Image: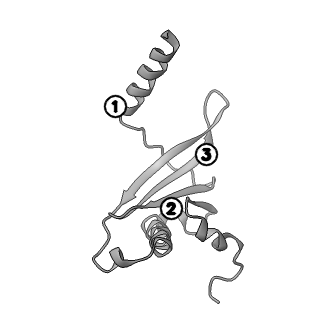
Amino acid sequence: TEDCQKSFDTLRQCLIEAPIIAYPLFDQSFILQLDVSDIGPSVILAQKLMDDDGISREHIIGYASRTLSTSERKYSSTERECLAIVYGCSYYRPYLEGIRFTPVADHKALKWLQSTKDLNS
């Protein structure tokens, strides 16, 4: 149908255009989106901000990724997800230090991090 074609064309155009990187607002909280594959961790730093049209949207601040070392390739899935969190926090430390942020990971075994009160124990 015509609506399907229009939707497809819009999606295709979004995929071929370079994403716009937003300037960080340090009075707003950050979102740290994390994922890991067999190749390495990837991190997206974002903020949910109000657009000119009054709608709150996520704006990308930056992307980061790296490859796993030989020893890191032997990690379990949970260990790799933890590695992604450590990598993301380390990479974006200048942005995150002293500011509230929300880590977002798709790995259910890491839910315990949200309920842990003291991470030093």
In the image, residue 10 lies at what x, y percent?
Answer: 45, 22
Amino acid type, callout 3: Lys
Callout 2 environment at 10 Å: few (<14), some (14 to 19), or many (20+)? Answer: some
* Quadrant in the picture for residue 56: top right
Position of 121 compared to 95: left or right?
Answer: right
Instruction: Give the Cα separation between the discs numbered 2 and 3.
Output: 15 Å
| Residue at image location 46% in from the left, 65% down from the top | 88
- Determine the residue located farthest toward the left in the rendered image: 70
* Quadrant in the picture for residue 5: top left
Pick the residue in front: 80 or 1: 1
Foreground mark, 2 or 3?
A: 3
Mark 2 and mark 3 residues within 8 Å of each other at the beta carbon: no
* Secondary structure of residue under mark 3: strand
| Residue at image location 49% in from the left, 11% down from the top | 1
In the image, residue 53 lies at what x, y percent?
Answer: 64, 26
Q: Which residue is mark 2?
A: 95
Q: Is residue 118 above or below residue 68?
A: below
Amino acid type, callout 1: Ile
* Secondary structure of residue under mark 1: helix
Q: Which residue is mark 1?
A: 16
Amino acid type, callout 2: Tyr
Q: Which residue is mark 3?
A: 48
- Is tag 1's residue or tag 3's residue first in the polypeptide sequence? 1
